[in-house]
Image: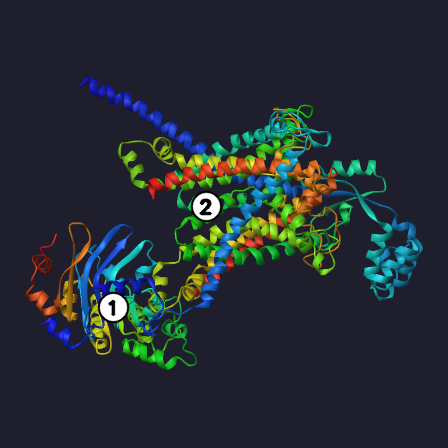
Amino acid sequence: MNEYTDLAGESNTNLQKRHRDSKIWRTIFYASTAAAIIILAILILSIVNQAFGLVVLKNTVEPEKISSVPLEQLSSQDLIKILKKNLTSNRYKTIDRDMPFTARSQADLVDLVIAEVVKPTVVDSYHLDVSILHRNEIMARAAEKYPNGHVEFHSWLNPEFITRSMSSTPELAGVRTAIFGSLWIILITVLVAFPTGVGAAIYLEEYAASNRINKIIQTNIDNLAGVPSIIYGILGLAIFVRGLGYFTGGGFLGSGETGGRTILSAGLTMALLILPILIINAQEAIRAVPRSLREASYGLGATKWQTIWHHVLPSALPGILTGTILAISRAIGETAPLILVGASSFINRDPSSVFSRFTALPIQIYNWTTRPQDEFRNIAAAAILVLLVLLLSLNAFAILMRNRFTRRIS
Amino acid sequence: MREQIMNHTLSTVQIKPASRVPEFLRKKKRWNEILIQGFLFFCGFVSILTTIGIVFELGKESLLFFANPDVSLLEFFTNTRWQPSIGEFGILPLATSTLLTTLIAMIVALPVGLSAAIFLSEYASSKARSVLKPILEILAGVPTVVYGYFALTFMTPVLRGIFGEQNVEIYNTLSAGLVMGIMILPLVSSMSEDALTAVPRSLREAAYGLGSTRLETAVQIVVPAALSGIIAAFIIAISRAIGETMIVAIAAGSGSNFTFNPFKAAETMTGYIARISGGDVGYDTPDYNSIFAIGLVLFLVTLGLNILSRRLSAKYREVYE
Amino acid sequence: MIDHQTQTKPPIISAEDLCIFYGNFRAVKNVDMKIVPNQITAIIGPSGCGKSTVLRSFNRMNDFIPNCHVTGKITFHGHNIYDEDVDPVQVRQKIGMVFQKPNPFPKSIFDNVAWGLKINGMKGDLSEPVEQALKQAALWDEVKDHLKKSGLSLSGGQQQRLCIARALAVKPDIILMDEPCSALDPIATLKIEDLMRELSKDYTIIIVTHNMQQAARASDYTAFFTMDSDRAGVMVEYGETSHIFTNPQDKRTEDYITGRYG
């Protein structure tokens, strides 16, 4: 009896300890999960922090020196006169050839004078947090260091940033060429990877008997999904850029000065990269189609392909599309393979065909990040925001599409 | 009797006698079906071609690399200097920094990832899960170049602030490794969670029925039961860290450096490949060939890890499905 | 009695020494069965005795089960449907099937019925044959005003009749029914049974059921299957339904129909 109560007492304190441990660890597990959220928040904030903030601008030529009245109040004639006087004749002609001065509106001309003559340049920039917390100090220091400069709030992510092409001056650089490059590459990637991937998934799920070759194919796909992306880049370099350069460079069509470092090579490399993911996702979607649907179709005397085309694929489509878009999101953000297949670090001509040289958004981010100047970090942050928005809208599109298809089927 | 046997063999072996099977049952040649099946098989076969392409190209160029009289296999694995331009071909400095960044990444990703997985599968309500899991998925979907930017512009300054600017170089393996750990965290947590949720409920109920707390059930019953799946996740994570390129290319520095000091710059295998190929490298130079030799090492290591991981996860599926 | 029948009317389809294997496991052995045309034949027996497996071998639906193979013969219009040069697709056009769970396509009611016609090469206006099939399946009056609605919007019993209409539209000779009422309520079940009776004027019906009353009520012939000591399904007895239920020859049949089984 005594023994028994003792045991109970002991297990009571023991129980308290066990409950306490349980609570402590619960907190640790919870904190680990919360850490992920906090990190995501820090990640986004640190990027936003660099994409916006105060800048110190300095004009190459002060507007007061070229005109006694503010530029906005000048007539078109006066503005053209200013341009003629301050620009080299070559530059003047080039701009005129683009679009005759006489055909431009007055507001356009004002912008032109500012861009070509006044040429404000960023001499100093601050992150968003500093800009908000230490605004006065920045003002004071800027006034002291750059007597002619003025401080203003600048969003590095702005409409011009998206529509301008590449430039070696950060405040004039934009991502238009990179966006076009990314879109072209993705187009090739999808055109190649989607049919091939879905085809392979259909083969493996619907046709393949469980024999040796098909088992090898399946295992091989699973293993390819884990191969680092840079290996695909090496493969692309060896096969598409070097080996097949005559075709991927457009040599067989008579152009071919690019030597295979083209959008086509990049797109094909990316296609190989996302193919295993796409196949695995599509297989899952096809596997989820109930057997009863197939049996109903076969029971009516349908052939295999009729069954697949009319019943299996339509039912699996939402899943396949979602999987495809996930794979595409991966391709849009991939950088390493593009470096290998020769993305150009500096290019300001928009791609015109699949045989064009190219740059892409992640490549641009990489290049700007690795520059030492602060301003390049700023535009890298802005480009990251563009990339993230692109990815987010793509995923939203995937969800929308999935919902729409699901509704139509049921 | 004899005729019967003859007939029997005829019906199974010979197809010819056209009159035997009536028209409405006779096999039709459906050319489109045959063509389609051929095309679909080809689609599946593309993956085999990809593997053959990888093995062939890596192997061929690596052979060329080792055919160079300055390079020997022994030197490749023992020399502690890697400077192809002056004839130093030792993979060790690249390998050690790869190991270092991977190790740091694992120190972050494995405990945190597993803890998050335990929380999601054993503690979180389904409502909490529906909020937390998409966030982890977003983290998994962030492009690696963005993580590289984060490492260089956020993590490095923070580390330099903590440990002192004189101690921590601008490019260092610690920053790259930590951020890589963050990148891999969602992978570890989602794969481990899959393994944990595959453990049947009856096992948990048995543990609760014996009066064990939630922690004891989770740690002493569920985790051991899912162990092979969790280890599979860890191995995949290691493989991913070894192959990761952009974070180290941006934040770990360029130029090989045989060091185990995480505060110092040191180029990894992937970082080297990215840097060399980013410049204008001529075909058939030692630089060009070295990319492939290192690529081959990288490919074999990650492939081995992936196969190992798949074996392990097949094991837990076998047990519970 | 059965001999008399089969002699007057040649069987439309018959199994001869039929064995069905899953890999090395023999699931069904030595079935000999002659199906009388324009009659309803029921296959009954305890679960796991291979009833459905036998039924599905009549139109080669077992082809889709990996490792499943068949020995012996199934003769349809005098030809073994497992012959090398017989097209299973053609077989299934002639021998339709209705499944355990109603499985309409996720399409409109009209398209559900019309699809089988389309794949069999029928073109142009299909509303006539669709209407006819729906009428035959006794569904027309219930759905004629909303043929565009999804087949999945119907009730379970209606869905099953839609599946029957779908099978009828392709004009098969035989309709195989694999426990068609197991997912339905008693009223819907009765409707299907009435329908079967009506259809047997034009079609031969083979139905698998685990419901003995249903076999007794709705069939002309009954085959009783059970599991042998080696776990292979065997046919114990086959004959006119009235005989099987009133005067079973085999002890096992008697035990089963009197509920002493197991």
Contact between marks 1 and 2 (CB within 8 A): the answer is no
Q: Residue lying furthest top in this view?
A: A2
Residue in the image at 67% along x and 56% along y: A247
Q: Quadrant of the N terminus of chain A?
A: top left
Which circle marks residue C75 in the picture? 1
In the rendered structure, find residue A219 and report the number of the disc placed on it: 2
Q: Nearer the viewer, mark 1 or mark 2?
A: 1
Horizontal side of residue A155 vs C51, given as left or right? right
Residue B101 in the image, given as x and y percentages of width and height: 58, 31
- Percent of width and height locating residue C191: 22, 72
How many residues crowd around disc 2 within 10 Å: few (fewer than 14), some, or many (20 or more)? some
Q: Quadrant of residue B153?
A: top right
- Say which mark, if any, is on residue A235: none
Q: Nearer the viewer, residue B179 or A149?
A: B179
Is residue B150 visible in the rendered image? The answer is no
Is disc 1 placed on a helix, strand or loop? strand
B321 or B187, nearer to the observer: B321
Q: Is residue B3 left or right of residue A308?
A: left
Q: Secondary structure at mark 2?
A: helix
In the picture provided, is B140 more to the left or to the right than A79? left
* Residue type marked 2: Thr
